[in-house]
Amino acid sequence: MIKRFLIAFVLLAVVCGGLVYFNIFRNQAIENFFATMQQPALPVQTVTAEPASWQPGIEAIGTVSAVRGVDLAVEAGGVVREVNFTSNDAIEEGTVLVQIDDQIEQSNLIAARANLTLAEQTLARAQQLRTRGVSAESSLEEAEANAQAAQSEIASLNATLSQKALEAPFSGTIGIPQVEAGQYVTTGTVVATLQDLSRMRVDFSVPEQQRSQLQIGQTIRVGTENGSFDYSGTIVGIEPRIDPATRLVSIRAEVENTEEALNPGQFARVRVELPEEPDVIALPQTAIVSSLYGDFVYVVREASEEQEQAAEQAAEQAEEMPEAAAAAPAPAEDAGPTMEARQVFVTTGRRNGSLVEIAEGLSAGDIVVSAGQNRLSNGALVTIDKSESPLNRGNPQTAEQVAQ
């Protein structure tokens, strides 16, 4: 009985040990396979570094205002009798917008005209009597003074009446009325805003270091929050004094607003166009990788025959192993030959839209990875994916066109 028990125990130990050894051997074999397996070529998208014309510029943030825009206020107090406009009306120059009650002044004007008529008649008689020599010189002088006083009284009343009528100083678009008929207003009460939207000005500031690059008449581009620079204008004023608190220089430019898409008070992005520079290498910002050691790019070069064979074997092994096939990236439909990606540190310079100037590190003709570099390492094998980049969808503009 004991002998049978020992035999069964030994057989059970052998079977269990074999299962344990098999699992350990299998796991070790899988680990060795993945440790020594060559990574398949990764699909990337590239751009060729070529010298092109570079349009440098100075970018700033500005505020839009109308060249002719004012807040209209009454010059004399009183009760509002008429409001002759509504919001957003197109107003012509000289249009009476608000009429203040002027009945007292009109009555005084009638009396002043009667006094003027009497004074002129008195002056005429005094002149006739003086001509005949039957009147004193003082009587004629008194009559002349009375006539002039009457004329001055009428001129004063006419000026008061003109202050009771608020007229548009120029043609433009009127804003929301701030007063109503029957309301009592005092001198200086704002009635509405009047803005001529045909031509706008943009006020912005630049650092004092860039002051020497600006001059009157220089071209600027103006854009809004949508990101595109749709409007063109010129610099009309440069503040001669630099703000000692901020070290900024105030600049004023004027822009044609033919479609009236710009509005006073609006946020504006300004770009001052500087002289064009030839033979500048620029890359999309997506091609630049930043690290603690500096900025770098991946330059694609031809791979050796051994590397190409290793990449082909890796692809075949990845297809045979389910785990590796799931982890490996899908090959691109338009993929080219296998190539090698090398890490190259670069010195970046100015920026223009989506492009970055490369001051050092690249030569003309270098093929640089512009998409897919987040999975790369130095010496990784890649294939160039010639399909359309997601960054370019809906934007057919090329890099050279952006630079220009």
Image: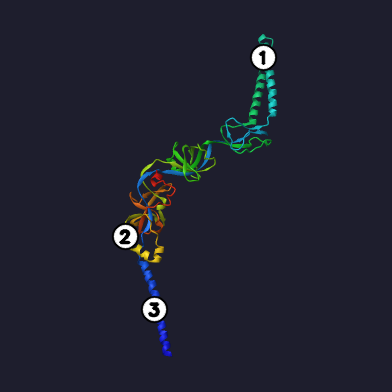
Which residue was labeled with disc 2? 308
Answer left or right for 53 relative to 70.
left
Q: Nearer the viewer, mark 1 or mark 3?
A: 3
| Furthest-left residue in this view | 305
Which numbered disc, 1 or 2, marks the residue closer to the eye? 2
Name the spot of residue 183 as percent of width and height, x first: 68, 36
The tally of labels here is 3
| Front-lying residue, 10 or 38 | 10
Q: Does the residue at mark 3 contact the one at mark 2 (Cβ under 8 Å)?
A: no
Who comes first in sequence, dot 1 or dot 2? 1
Q: Estimate the spatial distance between the alpha carbons at disc 3 and disc 2, rounded to whole Å.
A: 41 Å
The reply to whether residue 35 is visible in this rendering is: yes
- In the image, farthest residue toward the bottom: 1
Nearest to N terminus: mark 3 or mark 2: 3
Q: Is residue 180 above or below residue 49?
A: above
Q: Quadrant of residue 70?
A: top right
